[in-house]
Amino acid sequence: MDKIDRKLLALFQQNTRQTTAELGERVGLSATSCQRRLAKLREIGVIEAEVAVLSPKAVGRPLTVVVEVILEKGQSDLVSRFRAFAASRAEISQCYYVTGRADFLLVMSMTNMEEYDEFTKAYFFDNPDVRSFETSVVMSRVKVSLAIPVL
């Protein structure tokens, strides 16, 4: 990646709806060159996905919780099972396998506290692989982004 790719990625992360002509003008390339670079960046896996950031409240999921999960043991089969579980659940928007006190950090979107309570009963309390979990309820969204500094 060169400086132009990095500038292109920085702009693209801000707004993926910009046309290649608009992006090209801002980085000093033709629309066609810009389109080719974006295609290459997708092909080599630099651009993994292009997503919309939704308002949780507007779609009826105003409760965001951040959950630290500690598994019973650090065995690879428990980790693999929990990874597969987390990847399968729509309520879990982000899941990180982490170092430190917890094994996993989850960001979850729920309709209300009752739904989260039912989730914890079904998937944490009744799960023999989960030793404990700690929940933090998000009071307000300060910043929501998956952008990565590239410049």
Image: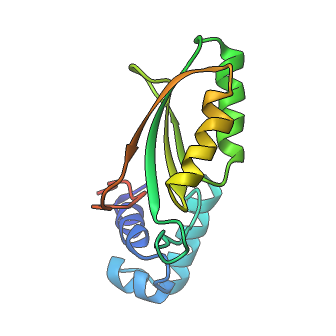
Which one is in front, 74 or 40?
74
Q: Where is residue 122, by image quadrant? A: top right
Residue 2 locus on image (x, y percent): 39, 57
Residue located at (48% from left, 68% from top): 56
Say if 53 sits above or below 66 in the image: below
Residue located at (29% from left, 57% from top): 151
Check the picture and name the quadrant holding the N terminus. Answer: bottom left
Say if 76 sits above or below 118 in the image: above
Q: Where is residue 100, by image quadrant? A: top left
Q: In this view, does 126 lie to the left or right of 131?
A: right
Residue located at (33% from left, 81% from top): 26
Going by the picture, which residue comes out furthest to the front?
114
Residue 77 locus on image (x, y percent): 72, 17
Residue located at (46% from left, 84% from top): 18
Residue 88 locus on image (x, y percent): 72, 46
Count how many numbered circles sit on residues in the image: 0
Residue 92 can be seen in this image: no
Residue 17 can be seen in this image: yes
Residue 139 locus on image (x, y percent): 31, 57
Which one is in front, 129 or 42?
129
Say if 44 sits above or below 135 in the image: below
Q: Which colour scheme is used?
A: rainbow
Q: Is residue 110 left or right of residue 66?
A: right
